[in-house]
Image (cartoon, helix red, strand yellow):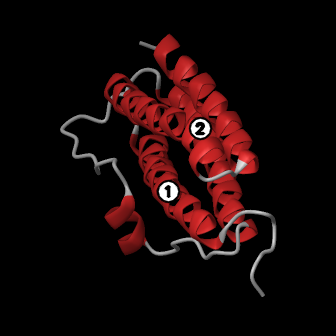
Amino acid sequence: MKANIGIEVKNTQAVANELSNILSDEYVLYTKTRNAHWNVEGKDFFEKHKFFEGQYEQLDDFIDKVAERIRQLGHFPPASLKQFLGLTQLTEATREKNDSHGFIHELLEDHEAIIVKLRENINRFADEYHDAGTCDFITGLMEEHEKMAWFLRAHL
């Protein structure tokens, strides 16, 4: 059954498409943060291992919330690695060293890219697609990414 929530189907589809891109970014960032957690080396190993764990746990929650928002709009989220890689703006990392500084710098850049994308869509979702709920949702998501970016930036 289609969602009858006061938003035209063409608009819920457009929002779901953009949320699918955001979901893909979240999933790729989650994977890269897991990689940092598993593979960080150096004198600060234990501290950064725990730090990255907290970060990927937050991202796991974001992934679930974005996918559920797509479902609330009556659409299906992407759910395969192939789909995520095809929709993300982020790139997979290749590393020569597994030091915390390198991981933190790269993850910070990815958070900032997601923040910019979320910020670009806030007014678009409200004004163009008449979806105040998703506008509010991604505003909150953006604020969470800003906090995570701040925590990463504080380590540099």
Vertical position of residue 150 compared to residue 77: above or below = above
Q: Residue at x 37, y 29 (%)?
A: 109
* Helix, strand or loop under label 2: helix
Vertical comparison of 17 with 122: above or below: below
In the rendered structure, are the residues bearing label 1 and label 2 in contact, judged by CB atoms less than 8 Å apart?
no
Q: Is mark 1 on a helix, strand or loop?
A: helix
Q: Which amino acid does label 1 sit on?
A: Glu
Q: What residue does disc 2 label? A: 122
Q: What residue type is labelled 2?
A: Ile
**Is residue 35 found left or right of 96 in the rendered image?**
right
Q: Position of residue 68 (x, y in %)?
A: 71, 64
Location of the C terminus (image quadrant): top left
The residue that appears at 73% across and 45% down in the rendered structure is 132
Q: Position of residue 71 (x, y in %)?
A: 70, 70
The quarter in which the N terminus is drawn is: bottom right
- Residue 138 locus on image (x, y percent): 64, 42
Which badge, 1 or 2, comes first in the chain's sequence?
1
Q: Is residue 3 left or right of residue 144?
A: right
- How packed is label 1: few (under 14 Cα within 10 Å), some, or many (20 or more)? some
Residue under label 1 = 18
